[in-house]
């Protein structure tokens, strides 16, 4: 159930950017879940929120760096990287720069 809620939040982030940002604390909590699908879905939702809301991008870049540093499952880590880096534009560039220690 939690992974599906995360996915839905990610899917509606562009239509409701000010509403979905209220979910950020719970999504960040879900990135620590024992379930790999929950962690990946939360990372997806956070990425979509950041892409649709420039006000939260800076905060989430530092959070993504923490998420990737603590992720031990290589498959999940790769999914999180692909989610954050798969789209062009400001968010992907900012996220990549963060991962490389350039911000």
Image: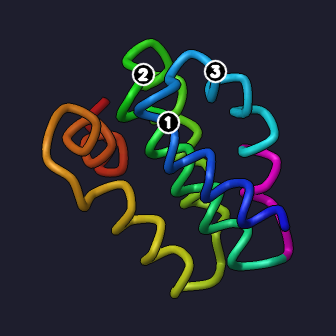
Q: Which residue is mark 3?
A: 19
Q: Which residue is mark 2?
A: 53
Location of residue 4 with respect to 50 vertically, above or below: below
- Badge 1 vs badge 3, beta-carbon distance below 8 Å: no
Residue 13 numbered mark, or none: 1
Secondary element at image label 1: loop
Tell me: 88 left or right of 9.
left
Residue 2 lies left or right of residue 8; in this view the side is right
Choose top left, top right, bottom left or bottom right for residue 26: top right
Inter-mark Cα distance, 3 to 2: 10 Å
Q: Quadrant of the C terminus?
A: top left
Q: Residue at x 19, y 41 (%)?
A: 93
Q: Which residues are magenta?
A: 28-34
How busy is the neighbourhood of tag 3: few (under 14 within 10 Å), some, or many (20 plus)?
Answer: few
Based on the picture, tell me whether residue 31 belongs to the magenta stretch: yes
Q: Earlier in the sequence, mark 1 or mark 3?
A: 1
**Comparing marks 2 and 1, which lies closer to the viewer?**
1
Identified at 50% across, 50% down, the residue is 11
């Amino acid at each position: 159930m939690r992974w599906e809620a995360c996915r839905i939040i990610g899917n509606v982030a562009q239509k409701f950017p000010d509403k979905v940002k209220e979910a950020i604390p719970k999504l960040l909590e879900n990135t620590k879940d024992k379930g790999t699908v929950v962690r990946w879905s939360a990372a997806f939702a956070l990425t979509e929120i950041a892409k649709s809301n420039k006000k939260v991008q800076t905060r989430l870049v530092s959070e993504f760096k923490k998420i990737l540093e603590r992720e031990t499952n290589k498959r999940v880590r790769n999914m999180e990287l692909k989610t954050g880096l798969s789209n062009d534009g400001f968010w992907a560039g900012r996220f990549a720069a963060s991962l490389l220690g350039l911000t």
